[in-house]
Image: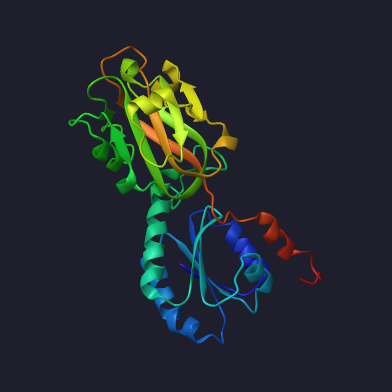
Amino acid sequence: MLQHVHSDAEFNTLFNNTNGLFVVDYFATWCGPCQQIAPFFEQLSNKYQSATFAKVDVDKCPSTAASQGVSAMPTFIFYVKKAKVDSLRGANPTELEAKVKKWSEAAGSSGLNDETQCEVPGQMDLTGFISKNECECLNFSGNHNFKRFMDSNNSENCYLESDCDEQLIINLSFNQPVKIHSIKVKGPEKYAPKTVKIFINTPVTMDFDQALRSNAVQVLELNEKQVLDGEIINLFFVKFQNVRNITLFIVDNQGCADTTRLTRLQFYGTPLSGTTNMQEFKRVAGKAGEAH
């Protein structure tokens, strides 16, 4: 769906009413490369229909362009749930479609391109921001392995299970820095995780000795109700403001079982880079008769 924006106030309204992926082409009518890539941008809007696409003429919307740091045309900016997550300068069709595809898939995995709202108000499911090929798990069972668990998109018919004992180390990398607000950990009865040590931004995956010795950013002591019901657990938000990777060391389980099982693992928060400051948009709407 391609929208043509003709004023700062019109952009403000569209921006506030768009919750999923929002791709904006900041262009100028006198810009040759802008005209060259315009048909391709329209094709993308027809191909990726779960996203919202908009064309913003920088000469008609100067305040919007300035607030978004647009200084060269064309500039394409990508927003997910009103957060600026990526950008591209120049008329490069291949790179543009690669970014549209990337963020369309991320928004889809996070449940933002449908009517479902995130379970945590003001946050988003960060599943779509996890780089699965850069994640690692230690001591998982071959029958209930880590890759299958990650590919299942938290389907409760597929679970991760430890192998030699009850301990697991899970290292997850994000495709861009994120703020993590809360976590959901779910498992069955006595097999569900109990003590979980959380580390962030480790240069390499920790081994079990390191994880035991090291001071965690936060330690969760989960009770049976929390893990059976899959309750959302708030983290020390101030300590998780710039997370590139996160490591969970599952120390033990609820019932001293030989192995630990995990049926669901979700993180909630927002992408860090380029978060949109809504105050910048409030000033362009103004009252009738005000100059912008």
Residue 57, located in which quarter of the rendered image? bottom right
Which residue is rendered at x = 26% and y = 15% of the image?
A: 258
Query: Quadrant of the rendered structure where residue 267 is?
Result: top left
User: Left or right: where does residue 56 sit relative to residue 108?
Assistant: right
Residue farthest along the right direction in this orientation? 289
x and y percent of residue 204 in the render?
37, 40
Q: Nearer the viewer, residue 15 or 242?
A: 242
Q: Position of residue 42 (x, y in %)?
A: 43, 74
Q: Residue at x 36, y 18 (%)?
A: 252
Q: Is residue 235 above or below residue 285?
A: above
What is the x, y in percent for residue 16? 60, 57
Q: Quadrant of the N terminus?
A: bottom left
In the rendered view, does 9 fall on the left or right side of 40? Answer: right
Q: Residue at x 39, y 69 (%)?
A: 95
Who is closer to the viewer here, 85 or 216?
Answer: 216
- Where 235 sits versus 284, above or below? above
Q: Say if residue 37 shows up in the picture.
A: yes
Residue 165 quadrant: top left
Along the viewing direction, whichever of 17 and 8 lies nearer the viewer: 8
Q: Residue at x 42, y 27 (%)?
A: 230
Q: Say which quadrant the C terminus sits in.
A: bottom right
The image shows residue 152, relative to residue 101, as above or below, that is above
Q: Is residue 42 left or right of residue 74?
A: left
Q: Is residue 117 visible?
A: no
